[in-house]
Amino acid sequence: LISITAQNRGEGTARNLKITVNITPYLIDKIEISNAGRLEIIEGGATGSRVVILAKELTPGEKQHFELTSSTKDIKHIEAQGDEEAIKNIFKFDVIFKPNL
């Protein structure tokens, strides 16, 4: 289980933040989004090796979280893209590996 949290640590609202996670050559078995009203899958997903999650906006101090279930704990690539304010204000990424239950 790969647990990923993005937090807006800035003072302004971050908009159009895309979080890309790639675990090639492994496959994502399942994706759980903690707040589907704030995060959405816009590319890839379960049964693929890559997913792109969109946060249309994150307000100051806001955290959003999602989890990927896979047979691996290896992340080939993870990145965030967004408007200038999104990249300037966000970051902290927390990536936690948990045992599959």
Image (tube, rainbow, N blue to C red):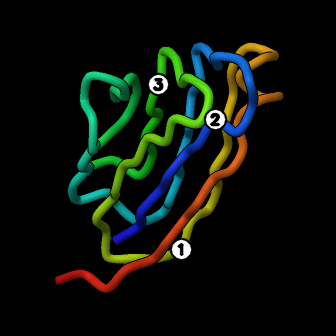
User: Is 19 situated above or below 28?
Assistant: above
**CA distance separating discs 3 and 2:** 14 Å
Q: Earlier in the sequence, mark 2 or mark 1?
A: 2
**CA distance separating discs 2 and 1:** 25 Å
Q: Amino acid type of disc 3?
A: Leu
User: Is 10 situated above or below 21?
Assistant: above
Question: Residue 61 placed where, x, y %?
Answer: 59, 36
Identify the residue under disc 1. 74
**CA distance separating discs 1 and 3:** 22 Å
Identify the residue under disc 2. 8
Q: Earlier in the sequence, mark 1 or mark 3?
A: 3
In the displayed structure image, the side of residue 81 where residue 43 appears, left or right: left
- Marks 2 & 1, CB-CB < 8 Å contact: no
For mark 2, does the 10 Å Cα neighbourhood hold few (<14), some (14 to 19), or many (20 or more) residues? many
Quarter-of-image position of residue 58: top right
Identify the residue under disc 3. 54
Q: Residue at x 52, y 17 (%)?
A: 57
Q: Amino acid type of disc 1?
A: Asp
Residue nearest the viewer, comparing 12 with 6: 12
Q: Nearer the viewer, mark 2 or mark 1?
A: 2
Q: Amino acid type of disc 2?
A: Asn
Question: Residue 67 placed where, x, y %?
Answer: 34, 56
